[in-house]
Image (cartoon, rainbow, N blue to C red):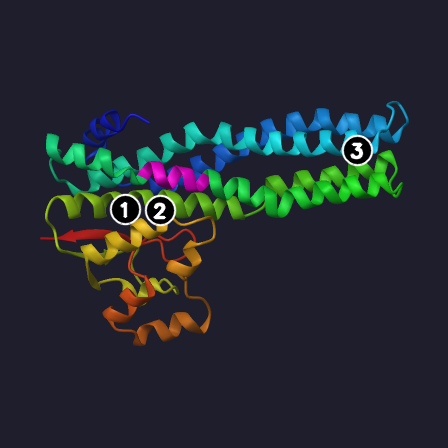
Amino acid sequence: MNLSMLYKLADAVKGMSPEVETLSFTLHSTWMAASESFLEAFDKFKLFEVDLLEGKVTYNAALYSSIRNIEVSKLTYELGTQLTTPVEDILGLAYASGVAETGIAMTAGLVDKLRDDLSANRLALQVVGYATAYFERFVDPLIYKAFGMIDAGEVSPTTFKNIYAGIIHKIKSDNYWKILGSVFASRAFNFAILDVGYYSGYKQYEIVNPREGFTGSVCDWIIGRTFPIDKAIAIAYSLETSAPGGDKLIYPWPAGKDIIEAEKLTDEQFIDLGLIIPPFHPHCKSQIALLA
């Protein structure tokens, strides 16, 4: 990703409302497109399995098991490869939108610092990591379960096709990807504001939300609070470099009665929880505003 180009783009979008919601949708659409390619390749593999069930190919257990493992690993790897460049571009645009939102002039020195920071790149790698981890945890076991049923002679070609239909449904309909898109587009946008503020000498920021009125989320108790940028930068870096799922340890989202309890928390307690950088929940509209 060419960050110099993206910071020039930031000048072009300056003054516009942040398109984080649109970017999160684009990120989700990118996943859908990549999964389509995955499924096209998978369909060819499925035909081989059906040929096996119908006795059209000779079965060698050891060889066939090896082929299966290689093919599934290859498909998952290719999925990650297809996602990398478009995800970098989308999160780069979200980051550039955050830079523009600050209204701070892009000096050569500031651009160099932001380029070396690489927040958007680290976030893009995380999205790809989440994608492959999701497959390894939820999709691959379904595939291998189908393989085991085939080897045990427990399925017919028709049943096998139904199993694959279930796998495809899991890949394409899970709300997980919509949430992932929302979270990472918001992070790239808000981390950019933090980075610009930090490198420009700002010390504090405020949590704001363009929506008016009660949101029914933890945002109701965080909007209007101010926090130190250096604390947020440390939390942001931990989030950017955590393993998929590790952010839940650094950045626990309140739910249920914890949302009500959040009203009683002091600013210092929010900092201790790591709960000081949007998003604070799926599809969160809160954002950071730098304070002079």
The answer for how far apart the CA atoms under marks 1 and 2 are is 10 Å
Image quadrant of residue 220?
bottom left
- Where does the magenta region start and end? 120-127
Number of residues whose C-alpha sits closer than 10 Å to that of mark 3, classed few (under 14), some (14–19) or many (20 or more): few
Provide residue 245's location: percent of width, then percent of height: 47, 53
Amino acid of disc 2: Glu
For label 1, the residue is 191
Can you say whether 169 is above or below 78 in the image? below
Q: Which numbered disc, 1 or 2, marks the residue that appears first in the sequence?
A: 1
Label disc, if present, on residue 62 of the rendered structure: 3
Number of residues whose C-alpha sits closer than 10 Å to that of mark 2, classed few (under 14), some (14–19) or many (20 or more): many
Residue at image position (18%, 43%) is: 196
The answer for how far apart the CA atoms under marks 3 and 1 are is 49 Å
Residue 34 visible to the viewer: yes
In this view, the residue farthest toward the front is 62
Residue 210 visible to the viewer: no
Image quadrant of residue 19?
top left
Provide residue 253's location: percent of width, then percent of height: 41, 62
Provide residue 241's location: percent of width, then percent of height: 37, 47
Query: Which quadrant does the N terminus fall into?
Result: top left
Check disc 1 and report its element: helix, strand or loop. Answer: helix
For label 2, the residue is 240
Q: Is residue 70 magenta?
A: no
Amino acid of disc 3: Ala
Check disc 3 and report its element: helix, strand or loop. Answer: helix
- Given this view, does label 3 or label 1 mark the residue nearer the observer? 3
Residue at image position (38%, 59%) is: 250
